[in-house]
Structures are given as C-alpha cells and as structure tokens.
Amino acid sequence: QVETLKAKLLEQAQEISRLRSELGGTDAEKHRDLLAAENERLRQEMKACEGELRELQRQQQAPCRDCPHLQENAGLQEQLSQLQREAEETRAKVVELNLEVQQKTNRLAEVELRLKDSLAERAEEEERLSRRLRDSQETIASLKSQPQQIKYIIKTVEVESAKAKQALCETQSRNQYLQEQVGMQKQVLKEMEQQLQRSQKTEAQLRAQIMMYEAELERAHGQMLEEMQAMEEEKNRAIEEAFSRAQVEMKAVHENLAGVRTNLLTLQPALRTLTHDYNSLKRQVRDFPQLLQETLRSARAEISQAIEEVHSTNRELLRKYRRELQLRKKCHNELVRLKGNIRVFGRVRPITKEDGEGPEAANAVTFDADDDAVLYLLHKGKQVSFELDKVFPPQASQEEVGATIQTAGMRRRGSHLLLTLPCFSQVFQEVQALVTSCIDGYNVCIFAYGQTGAGKTYTMEGTAANPGINQRALQLLFSEVRGKAADWDYTITVSAAEIYNEALRDLLGKEPQEKLEIKLCPDGSGQLYVPGLTEFRVQSVEDIKKVFEFGHIKRVTECTNLNEHSSRSHALLIVTVRGLDRSTGLRTTGKLNLVDLAGSERVGRSGAEGSRLREAQHINKSLSALGDVIYALRSRQGHVPFRNSKLTYLLQDSLSGDSKTLMMVQVSPAEKNTSETLCSLKFAERVRSVELGPVSRKAELGSWPSQEHLEVLKTLLGDSPGSTVPGRGHASPSPGQLSSRSASIRRKLQTSG
Ligand code: ADP
Ligand code: MG
C-alpha cells in the first residue's frame, strides 16, 4: 500500500512538473530538456553504431586477408573508435548535464524560495509604496495648499524690498525646485502607480496561479485523501477480514485447545491410574522372583508328591493289570477249552452261475430258523440234519465280517452290542478270540475244508474288494498290537507256503520249485522249523497285501492252470507274532496258520490215472492224516501221528498242546454236489464231536466208540464212498431233537464260561 501511495505521489509530482512545464519552464529546464533529447538521440546513434560494430566484427572474423573491405573496415573501426570516443564524451556530457540538471533543480528550488521571498518582499514593498503614495498624496495636497501662501508672499515681496525680491527669487527657485520636485514626485508617483499596477497585475496573476495550484493541490490532496481513505477502508476491510478469519481460526484453536484441555483432564486420572498400576506392577516385578521361587518351590513339592502318588498308583495298577492279564488269559483259555479247542463252522455258498441250470442246480440245503448251528441236506430224497458249532447261510456276507470284528473289539471294552448282532457274525467273534490268543502266545490254525468250488478260497482270501478271513484277521491283529503298543513291542512276520504232492515249497522264496524240509530245532526244545522258508516282517495291512500279491504272482507264474493247481494243493499263510512286555521282560511267540486246504472231493477211482491219480492219493493221504491227528489228539493218545503227512507235521506245534483250531467247512448247496456236501458235513461233524474234550461234554457224547470214529473218518476221507454213515441219528433225527440237544450244550457252555 505504501508502495502504491509512493507511486501515486510520484505520479502527482510528475503531473505537477507537467503542469509547471505547461505554465512555462525556466530556461535551464528547457535547456535540460533539449540536452536530454540530444542525449537520447546520441544514445540511439550509439546503439546503431554498436550494431554496426558487431556486424563489422562478425565480418572481420570471416577469413579474408586481402579483402577489399579491410581498409574500409579500418576506416570504419577508426570511425567507430571516434564514435566511441564521441559516445564517451557524450556520456560524460550527459553526466555533466545530469549534474547540471541536478544543480538547476536545486537552483529552481532556490528560485522558488526566492520567489516566495520576493512575493513577500513585494507585498511589503507594495505596502511601503502605498504608504509612500499616501504620504506623497498628503504632501501633494499640502504642497497644493502651499502655493497660495507663496503667491501671497510673492505679492508681498513685489511690494516690499529687494531683499524681499531676493527672498522672492529664492522662494521662486525654491518653488521651482519644489515644482520640479513635485513633477519628479509625480513622475515617481506615476511610475510607482504603473509599477503598482504591474505588480497588482502580476500579483493577481500569481494569485490566480497560486489559487489554481492550490486548487490543483487541493484536488490532488483530496484525491489522495480519497484514495488514502479508500485504501484505509480497504486496509480496514482486509484487516477486518483477516481479523474475522483470525477470530474463526482462533475460535477453532480455542475449541481445539478446549478439547485438548478436556482430553488432558480425562487423561490425567488415566495417567494417575496408569502410574499407580505401573508402580504396583513395578512392585510386583520386584517381588516376582521371590514369589516365583516360592511358587516354584511349592509347585515342585506338589509335583514331586503327585509324581510319587502317580508312581505308587501306577505300581499298583501294573500289579493289578498283570494279575488281570493272567486272569484274562486263564479265563480265555478256560473258555476256549470249554468250547473245545477245535471249533467247526459250516458255510454254505450261494448257488452260482457255474452250477448251471435245471434240477442239478437246485438248492438242497436248508436251515433251522431257531437254531443257527443246524442245517438240513436233502440227499437222495432224504433230509439229513447236521449240527456244527455254527452254520453260515449263503446270505452271510463278507462285510458283516469286518463289522463284527470291529464290534467285537468294542465288546471287549465293555459294550454289549454284539449280543444284538445278526447270528452270522459270530464266526468272526471266534476269529477275533483266536487272534487274541495268538497275541497272547498261543498257536492257532484256521482251516478251510471242502470240495473244490465250495468257497474255501473265497472265505479265506476273499476278493480285492471284499477280503476274507485272512486279511480281516490280520487287520484285527494289527489293531490289537497297536492297542497294546504302550506296554508291548511286537514283531509280526509272514511266510507263505504250499504243499503239493507232499512237497513243501516256499511261495515267497527266490526258488519256488525248491522242496523244503521240516526239521527239529537243534536246541533240543522239540520245536520244528523249516530251513530256508522266507519270512517277511510286516507292519500294516498294506504290507500283507503286498506279500499276498507276491505269493499269487509266484503261483501264477509257476502254474499253467492256477485254479486247477490251487484245488490240488494246500496253501498256508503262517503269521508269527513275537511279543516283548517292556515292563516285565516277558517274551511270547504265537503262530497264526491260515490254511486253504486242497479240494476234498473224491476222484473217481476208475477214471483217474497218472499224475491226477497221484495228486488224489496225496490229497487223500494228507486229509486223512489230518483226521488221524485230530482223532489222536481228541482221544489223548500217547502217540499222535503228525509225521504221516507234510501238512500235519508242519502244523504239529499249532495243533497240539494249548493250540486252538478253527475248521471252516465249505459246502455247495447245489443238488449235483449233495454227495460231496454230505461227506464234507459228516467230516465236520465228526471232527467236532471228536474234539469235544471237557468231561461234561465227553459224558454227553460218551456213547461214541472211538473205533467207530476212526471208521467214519476213514470212510469220509475217501476209502468207501457212498457207504452209510453211522452216527447220532444222522439218518433220521428230527430237527426238534437236534435243537434241544444243541441248546443244552450251549447252556452248559454258558454256565461254565
Ligand atoms: P474253492 O476255493 O473252494 O475251490 P472258491 O472260493 O474258488 O472255491 O469259490 C468258487 C466260486 O464260488 C467262486 O467264483 C466264488 O466267488 C464263489 N463263492 C464262494 N463262496 C461264495 C459266497 N459266500 N458268496 C458268493 N460267492 C461265493
Ligand atoms: Mg480254492
């Protein structure tokens, strides 16, 4: 704002100077203006000369030595230097002139001052002159009045003496002089009047000029004042705006401040509590190590006491567990013993496509709705009933097997679910009991007996999607072993062998054709072993599957017709379970023998010859040897003829002593197979009855002469096909009688076990 005011003042000064020049500047000013114009002209000229010089220099830079312009150039340069000199002089002159201008401006100011002074002087002079004029007028007036006196005096003189005349002369000269004086005075007065008039005129002029100046100045002043006022207003407005803005900002700041203050106010108590907390925490931290030590000490004491208690409880529990284990084993053995060490089940397969159609494929087997241990066979128009430990009808599925095994596991943990399960599933309860025995260190044999095509392989091996006893038993074995892993270390190994034509061969070995021998252990323990029989250690069902696949591949590659071959040979899967109780150091070894026997059908004596006859003879021999062994065991004979066949010899330690045996007798329900079915069932019943050892059962079945059993077995094993089978009313017992008998046996079993 000050700057704009200054600019405006400058403008006003310029305006004044313009007005002044309009009024007519002084000579010096005019001279200065002329000089300034001259100066400007010279400056223009110099600029033009400089431009020319530049042009010349540019031309000079061009390579032209003998150029005709050189001289011209030199001349021009001289001219240029001349001009430069002139310019320099002019510049000096300009400086001088500037100085002169300055001086003249100063002088102008002085002149103005003097003008003012002279105006004052003139006023005084006017005053003085008017005074003198008044005086002169008065004098003139007085002088005018005087001549009459003088005339009078003259008259008087003319009358009187020469002296008077002289005095008159003198008076006349004096009058002359005075008249001259008056004329002079009049002249002076006239001049004075003229001068006064001029002065008055000048004064009027000056006055008008001054008034004009004053008006101008006043106007400028007013304008300036207006502008200043406008500026003031603007300034005030700006100040107000700034003030209001500042006020708003201030207000906001105040609000903020108030917020901050309230925050501070709220924070203060929080800070106080924090400080308090911090102090208490500090105290706690200071006290913490000590507290921790104390707590640790007491915790240690508590823990050691608890450990001590747990130790003693553990010791007590271990003691109880061992006692219970012994008791369980004893009970289990007792139960198995009461049930009989040899259990016989019958399984009837469904009618299949292979059985063909028509009357030959008709179903000849029926079941007792009330008794799951009895089945009826319609043979040659007669219905013959058989009682086994358990009979499985065709609809008994493999799936039920798995379910039964799992449920059996639950039963041992206290559930009674099994009691409500379908009757078919009980076969696997038996399998489960046998697997448990095997883990406890007993030897177990599970046989599948029956004519070819009756379902032995199906029951033992099953199909990939529907596995049989072998896999499910092993699965249970693994899960049992896992369950006991906390206390026991178990090693499970698997061997697979085949007995064909009384030759024992290793199915997992490198040389399957090699015939293996069964030998007595050299340690004198009486145990048997097979040197060179491959054993695979297995840890899961997957391992077992691999072993089975391997064995199958061997059998397939070795034989041209696997089905034919398999029905002519016994296939054995020998699972050995070795256990170590980590707490007692007790070691157990149990063997699970899973045997898929050769087909039990009798080969037509007339048609068979060569290798077929030899096969048949070998099979008959081994199966009758099995019958003999079981008979000898049952009748507690001193000599058991294990060595009569490779099969019984190999299984010697798994058939004698505390060993347990399960015989699964497979039968076909087709009409065309009834005679073979009859033989199989008779064998099963004989085996079962022979085995029943306990006194109570023995008493009930005591009417069976042992010699008769032998006869029956021999008949069954193929010596006299078609001969009638003596026995407990097998020819004609009524189903009712059978049911009551089996029920009485079961009752006894239940009460004793
Ligand atoms: P084996 O081994 O006694 O000669 P297989 O086990 O080979 O007899 O069985 C002969 C046929 O009967 C096979 O095709 C088998 O699938 C079928 N089979 C056997 N038992 C059953 C069953 N319980 N349910 C369904 N099919 C069966
Ligand atoms: Mg088979």
Image (spheres, rainbow, N blue to C red):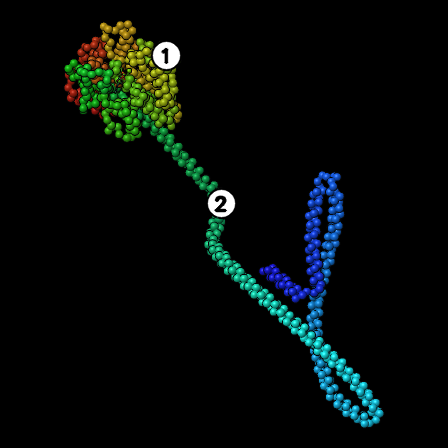
Q: Residue at x 70, y 56 (%)?
A: 39
Residue depth check, mark 1 versus mark 2: number of the one nearer the observer: 1
Marking on residue 512 = 1
Asked if residue 604 can be seen in this view, the reply is: yes
Distance from disc 1 to disc 2, alpha carbons, whole Å, reads: 79 Å
Decide: few, some or many residues near mark 2? Use Cα within 10 Å; few <14, some 14-19, many ≥20: few
Q: Which residue is mark 2?
A: 285
Query: Where residue 260 sits in the image (x, y, percent)?
Result: 48, 55
Name which residue type carries label 1.
Pro
Give, as a three-letter code, the residue at label 2: Val
**In contact (CB < 8 Å): disc 1 and disc 2:** no
Residue drawn 74% across and 79% down? 187
Q: Nearer the viewer, residue 740 or 370?
A: 370
* Residue 355 placement: quadrant: top left
Q: Where is residue 335 drawn, in percent x and y?
A: 27, 23
642 or 662, which lies in front?
662
Mark 1 sits near ligand 2, with its Cβ under 8 Å away: no
Residue sitting nearer the eye, 493 or 458: 458
Circle 1 — which element? loop
Quadrant of the rendered structure where residue 504 is?
top left
Quadrant location, ligand no. 2: top left
Q: Is residue 246 above or below residue 169?
A: above
Q: Residues within 10 Å of mark 1 (few under 14, many from 20)?
A: some
Q: Nearer the viewer, residue 280 or 667?
A: 667
